[in-house]
Image (spheres, helix red, strand yellow):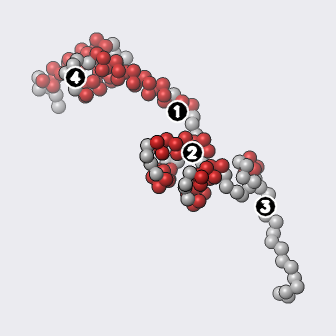
């Protein structure tokens, strides 16, 4: 090939609408990737998780950092189960959690003073299944009689 000939690179393909909507212009780092790099993740790890939901990543990083997890632990956990966007089923969890707390508090309030943690758990389960406090206490008395009478496992 003579040295006087000029070679030109082919024109790159146009950016996809999804890439343009993400604001990265079709090839740059995504918002998630930039955030992870700012948090101290390696560029390789940030690139690996670049397509995860940005708000889900932010929330999960904050939660895991509060628990004392380092970047390596977060990366390992995400490779097994990456953070997912919040859905309506997750929005019901706080209600379930508060119901469990209320049930446990009610079980503690009605438990006999000598009740073991396991017996308190039995009371809470009975209350959660819709038993009245009197019925839950009666069930506890039956369990205690079975345990002391040799009927237990």
Q: Secondary structure at mark 1?
A: helix
Residue 96 lies, in percent from the top left, at 45, 26
Q: Report how far apart the C-alphas of labels 4 and 3 lie in the structure.
A: 71 Å
Residue 111 position (above or below residue 76): above
First in sequence, mark 2 or 4: give its number.
2
Q: Which residue is mark 3?
A: 13
First of labels 4, 3 by sequence position: 3
Label 1 crowding class (10 Å Cα cut-off): few <14, some 14-19, many 20+?
few
Picture coordinates of residue 51, whole percent (x, y): 62, 50
Please state which of the two labelled residues, at mark 4 or mark 1, is closer to the viewer.
Answer: 4
| Image position of 121 (left or right of 153) | right
Residues under labels 2 and 3: Cα distance?
Answer: 30 Å
Q: Which residue is mark 1?
A: 90
Q: Out of 118 and 108, give the one closest to the viewer.
A: 108
Looking at the image, which residue sits at the far left? 149
Q: Quadrant of residue 127?
A: top left
Asked if labels 4 and 2 touch by Cβ distance under 8 angstroms, the answer is: no
Which is nearer the N-term, disc 1 or disc 3? Answer: 3
Q: Residue at x 15, y 25 (%)?
A: 147
Q: Where 113 falls versus 20 (above or below)?
A: above
Say if 97 sits above or below 34 in the image. Answer: above
Where is mark 2, residue-wise?
57
In this rendering, the label closer to the viewer, 1 or 2: 2
Give the spatial CA distance, label 2 vs label 4.
43 Å
Badge 4 crowding class, 10 Å Cα cut-off, few under 14, some 14 to 19, many 20 or more, is some
Mark 2 or mark 3: whose residue is earlier in sequence: 3
Give the alpha-carbon distance from disc 4 to disc 1, as whole Å.
34 Å
Residue extending farthest to the right is 4
Q: Which residue is at a point 21% across and 19% down the rendered structure image?
A: 113
Q: Residue at label 4?
A: 115
């Amino acid at each position: 090939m003579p040295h006087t000939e000029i070679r030109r690179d082919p024109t790159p393909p146009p950016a996809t609408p999804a890439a343009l909507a993400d604001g990265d212009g079709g090839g740059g780092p995504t918002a998630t990737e930039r955030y992870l790099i700012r948090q101290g993740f390696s560029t390789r790890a940030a690139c690996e998780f670049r397509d995860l939901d940005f708000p889900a990543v932010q929330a999960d990083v904050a939660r895991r950092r509060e628990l004392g997890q380092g970047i390596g632990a977060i990366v390992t956990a995400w490779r097994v189960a990456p953070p997912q966007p919040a859905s309506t089923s997750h929005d019901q969890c706080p209600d379930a959690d508060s119901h469990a707390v209320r049930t446990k508090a009610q079980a503690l309030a009605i438990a006999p003073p000598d009740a073991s943690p396991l017996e308190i758990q039995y009371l809470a389960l009975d209350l959660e299944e819709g038993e009245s406090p009197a019925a839950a206490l009666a069930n506890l008395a039956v369990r205690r009689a079975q345990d002391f009478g040799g009927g237990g496992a």
